[in-house]
Amino acid sequence: MSDLADLTISAAGVGLRSGEFSATDLLEAVHKRATMTEADLHAYLTIDRVGAAKAAVAAESAFRRGEDHGPLQGIPIALKDNMVTRAIETTASSKILAGWVPPYDATVVSRLKQAGSVIIGKTNLDEFAMGSSTENSAYGLTRNPWNPDTVPGGSSGGSAAAVAVGSALGSLGSDTGGSIRQPASFCGVVGVKPTYGLVSRYGLIAFASSLDQIGPFTRTVGDAALLLQAIAGHDPMDSTSYQGAIPDATSGLDAGVQGLRIGLITEMMGGEGYDPEVIAATRATVSKLENAGATVTEISMPSVDYALSAYYLIAPAECSANLARFDGVRYGLRVGGSTTEEMMANTRGEGFGPEVKRRILLGTYALSAGYYDAYYAQAQRVRTLVINDFNRAYETVDVLISPTAPTTAFKVGEKASDPLAMYLSDICTIPSNLSGHPGMSVPVGLDAAGLPIGVQILAPALGEPVMFRVAAEIERQAAFADRAVLATSAVPR
């Protein structure tokens, strides 16, 4: 039997149902992989061995009783540590929440449990999901399993690294400006940002509420569709939750791309900061789609050049409001002071890291009297232009394609002291967060240094079926095989 930790979710499901191995066997393989790799990678903040073992036994018992709760039953899944978990510490990688154990589960966690998943633990992230490299965690950085000298991307770097290295068969991350897709690209896995509102945000520690969305990391497009279907759907606990029918992301995975119209975003196909190898891989991918029967045209979307600037006004403004709740009074860290105001200032000063403080200050300034119209309101107008550009594009094409990130994974520490350079890592992903449309990253190859390259597929709101259809064809054409084995070859096993 091959190493169970290298299985896809689909393959593991077949093995579990045939009796080839048990959910406990699968969990033990994943735990063994984590034991061998965590010292080098630090993908996890918490591994819940006791809770996971109980869940695995429960899944086995359900199988024996003839109960099948779906394709995730018995499958080890990891969670980004900004999703609250009952009885498991949840920190959002911040000192201000050290030791906080929530009394309830996020909706996505409840849905995974209902599906019979085995929750392995909580993964590392940039503090409060603010970053593009997972170097901003208060509990130490995560490294990329393809080359531990490089970053895994961010902010969901731990979730991406865990799937790439096989210490989870799937995981959940959150995407506010690219925090699922960019680390998926850097780590050579599939990452999906669903349509805004398709997946409940209840129990997600908020960064920027009009932008945040939870989505899956997996090794294959098909696995991502299975995981998305399990967590999607209306939730009355989330006022922004979509109330209509859930689009079936699994419906067209084998349909190919014959007759589909694909747009290549002109503004994301080169220029300063773009790696020529990434651009070449993207064009090669599009050529393969054209050969498979798709019609390809270049689409100009002028407003995306301003999306980054708009995002870094809107997101910090929302974060400054959301993070006001962390004040040393209700939960988490409390640092004393002679007055309430001094206690709050001391708590926030010691509890928040530099990047979080930077964004709170940016957001508070943008919302302040005399500057609101000049900055925040103007950024919202740019957001409208971005939405309009996307809507016009989708009148003539079914999906849009671009690089997921302008480069492959960069060296640890390379951009840590230059916030603007770090922010530019998300230049290709941010526009679809502003529009609320779905997007995903699929690995298509390696650069000359042996690091993964991801291509991004974007679709209109609720366009997950056609997006996954194209992604599945890209995956077939790329034949990016043995990614788990390749990823772990750089890490002691």
Image: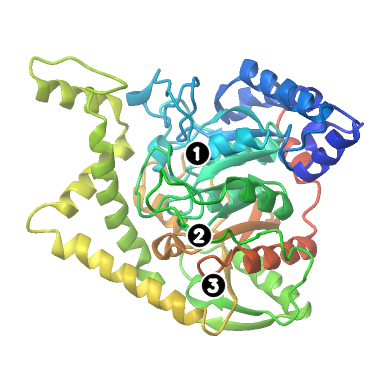
Separation of residues labelled 2 and 3 (CA atoms): 24 Å
Amino acid at pointer 2: Thr
Amino acid at pointer 1: Thr
User: Residue placed at 74% from the left, 20% from the top?
Assistant: 57
| Mark 1 vs 2: CB contact within 8 A | no
Element type at mark 1 = helix
x, y percentage for residue 426?
A: 45, 56
Q: Which mark is residue 107?
A: 1
Q: Earlier in the sequence, mark 2 or mark 3?
A: 2
Which of 473/75 is in front? 75
| Residue 301 shows in the view | no
Element type at mark 2 = loop
Which of 249/154 is in front? 249
Q: Is residue 37 above or below residue 221?
A: above
The residue that mark 2 highlights is 195
x, y percentage for residue 121?
A: 58, 26
Q: Is residue 345 above or below residue 253?
A: above
x, y percentage for residue 25?
A: 81, 24
Q: Is residue 472 above or below residue 182?
A: below
390 on left or right of 309: right
The residue that mark 3 highlights is 269
